[in-house]
Amino acid sequence: MSTQLAVFLAVFGSVTLMGFAAARWRRPDSIHSLEEWGLGGRAFGNWVTFFLLSGDVYTAYTFVAVPTLVYGMGATGFFPVPFLVIVYPMLFVVLARFWSVCHVHGFVTPAEFVRARFGSPGLGTVVAVLGIVATMPYIALQLIGMEAVFEVMGLPKGWPLTLAFVVLALYTFNSGLRGPALVSIVKDALILWAVLAVLMIVAMTPGQWETIFKIAEDRYAVTPRTDDGLLLPVQSQLNYVTLALGSAVALFLYPHTLTGVLAARNRGTLRRNLAVLPVYTLTLGVLMLVGFAALYDGTQPIGGNANTVVPQWFNENAPAWCAGLAFAAIGVGAMVPAAIMSIAAANLFTRDIYRVYLRPRATAKEETYVSKSVSLTVKFGALLILLLLNTQFAIDLQLIGGVLIMQTLPAVALGLYTNWFHRWALGLGVGAGLVVGLFMLWQVPKLGGTDGRQVVREHFGGSAWPLNNLGLDSDATIYVGIVALAVNLLVAAALTPLLRAADVRDGRDDTREHDYVADEGDPTVRRMTEILDGEPVPTSFFTPVSRPTRFENASDDDPSRRAYPRL
């Protein structure tokens, strides 16, 4: 057994034990509810929330695929840096309102909020289905990073990855959100070690970064491609900007991001972490530079699999034990977000499909069991996507998923500030956005070859739509998600006044303005517990509060609600 494999197995085994032990981590034995299993009791404090959100946002795929894109394309691969700069101020402003309204009403998913805000079970179901569909390939992409590590260590394809995912599935089933929350602490420590290793290796390189950048610039200058380079080519700038903006919007809307948010103890905890998390982007920036370092060292992907570039670079340039820790960082970095994503998808199915259409009177215990079972199904579905489909096509599926999840922005994000949109207008807007988005994706070919211009697959080859489809003499492209979202918003905004003028019945808003600013200690906030990474949880898990019924003081003329009956 190689040293790298021994270190990897030791770390992976320790993390597995932590995942199972998390089931008893300050958890009351008598409580069996979806909020307890799927949201950690809504009680994570500052430290746990930080590690959970960082584990949620910075995934193994980010630390593997993005440096690989830099390796192949140069500056184009740096789009996550601006999109993370954009997304955190957005999250800081919006997510506190989402936290409050969900804690007042006991919502576990964004689809529940949409259903209550616009009085539309159908619209809530659309949000839930889009969330599940968009999440499945995202989980599969986490496995791509782990698969690349196994390939570098010389393990066969198939059963090692399946075994690792079985372990992940079992401890998630057993521990719920507490499992990835606890494991994320180890994940962050390993990632920080990998960053330190990169800086130390480069520090021992003659000329350090200056030489590395010069070699990279020379390599891009002699390639037949015109869309690569140390600086961003002109024809790539529009796609770069729109992709960064669209990725920021999509990250906020993905169910796993919102699941981590709802696990926070209070608004202050959430906002403090959203203010600090941009610092973590520095680690991503350093690891992205591994793409340039791999060019300098002449690192070649194994078996033509470009995703092996990063682990192979560590394997060639770091001591064996250090490379093993880097491999473990990628492996554990895949487990944490994959677990959170599967929990988020399972919660969507349970609360917004199973309970709405199949078992409206399901007990809390039954809800939890269904969600646990669905989380297993989602994980193995993602594993099948990776094992049965071409790896590159799995990546393209994730890009399509991003376009899909962006169509929920008017209902979820704008719904946190206004109920002006008509529910039918929102539904038709989502439909229009999906039709336009999928049609544009169908028109995008998959390009390859040495010059990057050979058509490998005619349809669904990416998310960069060529502007020459409009008859323009241009090599520029634009991110499909932005165009589809613009169509969605235009349709929803245009149809809302028309539907109201036609007296088409709207849904009733079951939320009040105060719900969006309520915090821990407010009498309307329910199901709060003591901080999990501070004081022990009390014996009585649910804090008894005097909570007024919805709209007990509001009339049908109250502007905070609609007078139309819910359909």
Image (spheres, helix red, strand yellow):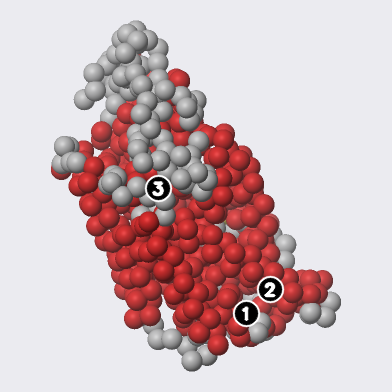
Neighbour class for label 3 at 10 Å: few (<14), some, many (≥20)?
A: many
The residue sitting at the bottom extreme is 1
Q: Nearer the viewer, residue 526 or 57?
A: 526
What amino acid is found at the position of numbered circle 1 in the picture? Answer: Cys
Q: Position of residue 69 (x, y in %)?
A: 59, 68
Q: Which tag, 2 or 3, sits closer to the chain's start?
A: 3
3D distance between C-alphas at marks 2 and 3: 34 Å
3D distance between C-alphas at marks 3 and 1: 33 Å
Please identify the quarter of the rendering in which residue 66 is found: bottom right
Where is the C terminus found, in terms of image quarters? top left
What amino acid is found at the position of numbered circle 2 in the picture? Answer: Ala
Name the residue tied to disc 3.
40
Q: Position of residue 96 (x, y in %)?
A: 51, 34
Q: Nearer the viewer, residue 377 or 167?
A: 167
Name the residue tied to disc 2.
197
The answer to whether marks 2 and 1 mark residues whose Cβ atoms lie closer than 8 Å is: yes
Which residue appears at 17% of the width and 37% of the height? 360
